[in-house]
Image: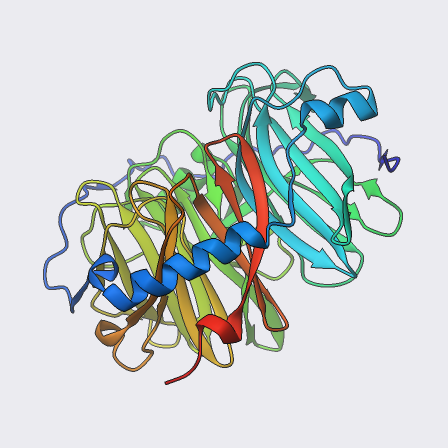
Amino acid sequence: MTEIKRELPLEGIFTPDIGTGRADTIIAGVPINGYNGYIRPQDNRAARELGDKCAADVVLNRIADFERTPEYCAKHGEDSPDLMVHVSSFVIIDGIIYMTYYANIDTDAEDHRRQQARLAFCSEDNPEDMTVVELQRVGDTLDGRKITDLYDTILMYKGGDEIYLLWTAAPDGNYHRLWCTFNIKTRTLSPVRPNRFRVGKVTNDFSITGMKAALTASRIPFKSMWSDIGIMQKLSTRVENGVTMYYTGAYSGNFNCIIKSADLITWEYVSAPSFANFSQWENAVYVIGDRLWYFVRQIECAQGFLTSYDLNAGAWERPVLVADTQSRSDFFVWEDELYLVHAPIDRNGFGIMRIDRYDPSKSAPVLVADMKDSLFYPFTAVYGDELYISYTVARKHIRLSHISLPKYFKKD
């Protein structure tokens, strides 16, 4: 196992929330009215048949599982294998796979009061020689505050030697987004610090209280937040005033929004859907030119919605409903086409739709893969002509596989 170095922790990393004392304005979730089309991927027979072939390839092309197994623990002198693992993101750099997730060694339950944040890495050619690193666990102390809860752990990469590792944890009970970097050359972890959340002229720690105070200071209504905070794994870029801005989605409970950042540390609020909806948790975001594509599940009605946001005009497009969608979704681009990866309610597979960027209501299912087994929270990345996909299996495995893009995504 590779030796990991850690820089010394910092002090004084948290800042007081800036607010105005105004009361929050909370928006209620209600059904979408006036949608622009309704797509039912599961009703497409050709997509289901192609999905059966894709499901077989996903199984056949499995690269590795990234949790700490009993065999891994025995090999590396560890006492406790993982009993629960969830929520993956990855990047492949010079043949090395870097994977993040959160884990529980005490119980097989998804229990935020016992979890720990993880980074694992290995060579794609030799995945058995894997290193698994604990970034933080419940019970640790950060700048004098006890970590009481821990959740989603992701990575982001914008080039160079630094991978950004971000996770949700609650110092003294208030959920924050925390970050550090991992230097792939020196195998060194930087000190842990909080991300920052900016709305207008107000910048607070990226925490539940900080988000609410910053939004309220700018008189921006928002849907109800609770529990943890999420930042979505997928980055897309847009150059603004000569600066490359990285876009993604953020969420807490019923609140979902677009955020952007120049440094992956301070995140600026951009917008949230202007139409009433039942959205909850993860929102997929992808920028192409001056248009941002957006997809999110809705808990109350089991329908996700696809929409877009004009970054110049600041206007939202009427949404298109997509049936039977649950958990995290994702976008990817291949040969100038935009695709949406979505997961069904039973969490036993995934679907992929080709997005019609001129008329989203004409977006078409390409495949609907029923794995006949657990597969949920998919995350994808394109390398050459291969689509790599990481996912959770029954909260027992963090798995990575790949499929051939030309085989499944031929242009009409």
Q: Residue 296: image x %, image y %?
A: 32, 53
Residue at 42% from the left image edge and 39% from the top image edge? 374
Which image quadrant is residue 11 in?
A: top right
Q: What colour scheme was applied to this rendering of the protein?
A: rainbow
Residue at 36% from the left image edge and 31% from the top image edge? 226
Q: Residue 16: image x %, image y %?
A: 55, 32
Taking the image as shown, residue 143 lies to the left or right of residue 244, namely right
Q: Residue 187: image x %, image y %?
A: 85, 44
Q: Is residue 111 above or below residue 12?
A: above
Q: Residue 41: image x %, image y %?
A: 25, 61
Q: Nearer the viewer, residue 275 or 86?
A: 86
Q: Nearer the viewer, residue 40 or 321?
A: 40
Q: Nearer the viewer, residue 195 or 187?
A: 187
Residue at 67% from the left image edge and 29% from the top image edge? 68
Q: Quadrant of the N terminus?
A: top right
Furthest toward the bottom, the residue is 412
Q: Is residue 20 above or below residue 81?
A: below
